[in-house]
Amino acid sequence: MKEENIMSDNDSFQINININDKNNNVNNTANDNHIDHDVNNDNTNKDDNNNNTNNDTQENGTEQTKNDKKNTIKYENIDVTKITVDNRPLRIYLDGVFDLTHFGHYRLFKAVKDKFPNSSIIVGVSSDEETIRLKGQTLMNEQERAESIQHCKWVDEVICPCPWIVTQEFLDKHNIDYVAHDGLPYASGDDSDIYDFVKKQGRFIATQRTEGISTTDLINRIVKRYNEFVLRNLDRGVSRSDLNVSWTREKRIQIGATIDKGKEKVLEVGKKGLEFVDNVQEWVKEPSLFVDSFLNTFGPSGHITTKIKEKAQQMKDEFTEYAINAPM
């Protein structure tokens, strides 16, 4: 029993040792982990400090790069029509509404890219809100206008929406070297020329407009031929409600188109038929003219009645002459 007790005590002692060893191991592990954690924290803090230092260095480097670039670039206003090629790696900014984007816009981008082949062409597209408030309604929304510019091969970046009036803060934010626009002063609000401060810095590129094409001109063409485009869309199945056209206007446009088609056919007949169609158009506009014209044509003294009387008299005379001269 004593031996068993001794064995039990030894067993118990051994277990306690093991538990203590385990605890010691756990404690040691925890301590090690704590040390590792502290080391990791130290490393993390060092990394954070390094990252912060790197970020500060990068920001300082970026600012330094900008400053170096500004110091190395010789700024002076440029007329795009008077230079051959400028190979400097510039960032050139153009802005506009670019509604109903047309070949005049694309020629502008190409002209700038051709003269500055190593430069990045950045195009700003104005927002719907500012454009409608300051200039008027657009046909395309800002997303459509921006995407139409984005697919142009001479454009490198698109900023939408862009400020209506370019500012120094905007130029600095996007690291823009030059602003390109046609050379005429562009007034807005109280500003007689919103690009004046850029010109004073010698950072303005004067471009040239394409004559004979503009968004305003395209809209004028549509408005001028309004009836034709309404008929075109009606013939293609577009409803009156979609075109915002009343029933009476639809019928008036259709009647006018029918008259125009008839007029074209009569042109082949001759001037007399043309005058008749012109008279019909006048009758549609003023019914009283129709009555007067009808009486002048078919009345007792009208052209047709006179012709009939003349023909009847001619036939009578011919019959009388035949009766007198006929052999018995």
Image (cartoon, rainbow, N blue to C red):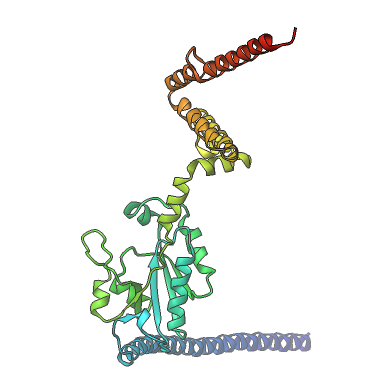
Q: Work out which residue is located at the far top of the displayed protein and give it.
A: 328
Q: In x, y percent, where is residue 14?
A: 70, 89
Q: Is residue 244 above or below residue 84?
A: above
Quadrant of the frame with the C terminus: top right
Q: Is residue 164 left or right of residue 107?
A: left
Q: Residue at x 47, y 16 (%)?
A: 295
Q: Nearer the viewer, residue 267 or 9?
A: 267
Q: Nearer the viewer, residue 246 or 62?
A: 246
Picture quadrant where residue 187 is located: bottom left
Q: Nearer the viewer, residue 170 or 134?
A: 134
Q: Residue at x 56, y 86 (%)?
A: 33
Tag count = 0
Q: Residue at x 54, y 30 (%)?
A: 251
Q: Is residue 172 above or below residue 7?
A: above
Q: Nearer the viewer, residue 207 or 8?
A: 207
Q: Is residue 250 visible?
A: no
Q: In x, y percent, where is residue 248?
A: 50, 28
Q: Is residue 86 visible?
A: yes
Q: In x, y percent, where is residue 189?
A: 24, 58
Q: In x, y percent, where is residue 183?
A: 30, 72
Quadrant of the frame with the N terminus: bottom right
Picture quadrant where residue 179 is located: bottom left
